[in-house]
Image (cartoon, grey):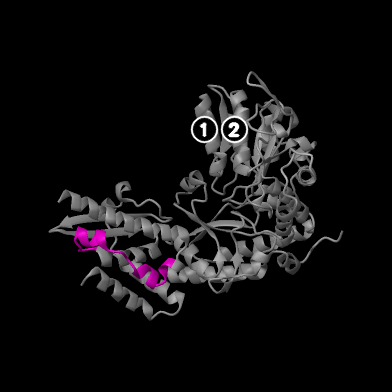
Amino acid sequence: MELINKISEIRNLFPALKQKVNGKDLVYFDNGATAQKPISVIEFINKMNSGVNGNIHRAVHELSARSTELYEGARGDIQKFLNAREREEIIFTSGTTASINLVACSFCQKFLKRGDAVIVTEGEHHSNIVPWQLACERSGAELRVLPVDDNGEWRLEKLPEILDNRVKIISVAHISNVLGIVNPVKELIDIAHKKGIPVLVDGAQGVVHTSVDVQDMDCDFYAFSGHKIYGPTGIGILYGKREILDNMPPWMGGGDMVGTVTFGKTTYADLPLKFEAGTPNFIGASALGEAVRFVQTIDNEFLKNHESEIVNYLLKNLTTIKGLKIYGLALDKIPLFSFTVDGLHPTDMAMLMDKMGIALRSGLMCSEPLMSKYGVTGMLRASLAMYNTIEEAEYFIESLKRSVKLLS
Amino acid sequence: MTIKEEEHRIVEEFSIFTDWMDKYEYLIEMGKSLPIINEGGRQESNLIKGCQSRVWLNANYKDGKIYFTADSDAIITKGIISLLIRIFSGRTPKEIIEVDLSFIKEIGLQDNLSPTRANGLASMIKQIKLYALAFAANK
C-alpha cells in the first residue's frame, strides 16, 4: 500500500479542519488536548451505529458476532501497533486516566502496603499524580517526586536518592503534556528493573508522536487515550505485561469479567476480560482500531521530517518575541510549545487568538505542580498534529505578535 | 441614573464598534484604567471561583449603598469587571438584587466569550448579588 506523504492529502481527510471560526479559517493548535478525527474513523463509527450494533461477547446472533469481531479485531491491531507480545495484554479502558486509575487501584490494592512508596515526576499531568495520591492514602504509602530541571528534563541523577526497596511502582509520562519533550523512559525503566520495580508509562502524548514498541521499551504498563490519536473519545488502552496483569485483582465487577458467579464465590475471567467489566465502549474500541490503522497509512519518515521542520520554525520565531519564555527545551521535542509572555495573561492571549481563528490551550494545563515550579499561574500552549502546516505556524506567529501588541 | 440607563449607555458606547478587534481594544483600555486594588485587597477570601483568570472583588457598604472595587490578573477580564463596577457600584442592595442585566448580550460579549469566560462573568455577577443580599440582610 502506498503511504500518504503530502500534507494537503492528509488535511483533506479531516472534515473538521475545513471550517471557519470567528470568520477565520480554523487553525487548530490544541491537539495536545484532543485531535480531530479522519473521515475513515467518523464513517466507521457511523457504520457501526447504523449496522453492526450488537452487544459483544454475549449472544449468538449475527450482529453480536460481527461487533465482537470488530472489537477483538481492534484489540489485535492495537497489539501489533504497540508491538505487544500478546493480544491479552491489551485492555480497553475509557482513556489514559482510567488506565492509570486501574493500575493505581488494582495493582496497589495487592502490592502497595503501609510504609511503601510510589514515584512520579514533577512534570506529570494531574491524572498521573492524583490516582497515586489516592492509592497512597488508601494504603498508608508515600508519594515521592523525581524533580525536573529548569528545561523540564528529568533529574535522573536524583533518582537513587528516592529509589529504595520501599518503592513498589514508578509512573511517568513518556512525553509531558506541558513540556513536549521525549523523556528518557528506557533509561529510567532500566534503572527501575535492576531493583525489580515495575514502571507505568503515561503515553497520552507519547503514542501520538513516537513509534511505541512496548517490548523494546520494556515498560510494565503503557496507557493512552483514543481521542488524542485521531480516534474517538471515551476509549483508551492499558497495555500491561501478562505476568503482572495476571497477578492483579479485578478492579471493577460486572458482566463479562467473570468465570462463574454464585453468592458464595465468584471466579474471574482470564485476561483481558478480567479488567473489562460491563458492556465496554465497543464501538469506540473498534473505531480506535480504525484510528491506529489510519495512522499507519501515513508515511512515518515524512511525518518526522514535517514535524521537525515545524518545531524548528516555531522555536526560531517564538524566541524573537520579546518577553516570551518557552518551557521545555530539549533536542528531542515534539511540536508542542508551552510559553508565557512577560506581563501578559495567557487567558487574554488565548481569547484574542481565538478571535483570529486559532485554537490554543491556556491555564494550568492540569499540571499545577509544574506551574508552581516555574512560578506561573498559567501558560499558553500550542500543540500541533500531523495535519498542521508551516503556513498555519506562520499565521500563528503573526497573530501572536498582534495579540502581544494589543495587550501591551 | 438607574442601572438600566447605565446599561443603555454602555450599549451605545459599544455600538460604534463594528470590528471585534476594536471592541476588545476598548475592553483592554478600560481594563488598564481600572484602578488596581492594593495588595491587601487581593486575598483568598475575596477571590471569585469559576474564572480562568483570577478576580478579586471587594464591597464596602456606606450610607445605604454598596461600593465595589475589583482587580484581576487578566486585562480583558479587568475590562469586563470595570463595566460591572460602572453598573453596580453606588447602588442600593435592593437595586442590585432586583436587576436583570441585558447589556452583556446586547454588546455581543456573551457570544464572543468562551464558555469558561462566560462562566467567569456569571460568577462575578453572582458574587456581586451575594454581597448585596448579605448587606440587605444585615441592615
The percent coordinates of residue A103 (x first, y second) are 62, 33
Magenta-colored stretch includes residue B103: yes
Quadrant location of the C terminus of chain A in the rendered image: bottom left
Quadrant location of the N terminus of chain A in the rendered image: bottom right
Residue annotated with mark 2: A104
Horizontally, is B75 left or right of A152 in the view? left
Q: In the image, what residue occupies the spot 57% across and 30% down?
A: A118
Host chain of mark 2: A
Q: Does dot 2 land on a helix, a strand or a loop?
A: helix
Horizontally, is A2 left or right of A114 in the view? right
Labels 1 and 2 within one chain: yes
Q: Is residue A342 visible?
A: no
Q: In the image, what residue occupies the spot 58% across and 33% down?
A: A119
Magenta-colored stretch includes residue B122: no
A325 shown above or below A163: below
Residue A134's tag is: 1
Residue nearest the observer in this picture, A305 or A203: A203
The percent coordinates of residue A62 (x first, y second) are 80, 45
**Three-letter amino acid code of the residue under disc 2:** Ala
| Alpha carbon separation for disc pair 1 and 2 | 8 Å
Q: Quadrant of residue A109?
A: top right
Magenta-tinted stretch: B89-110
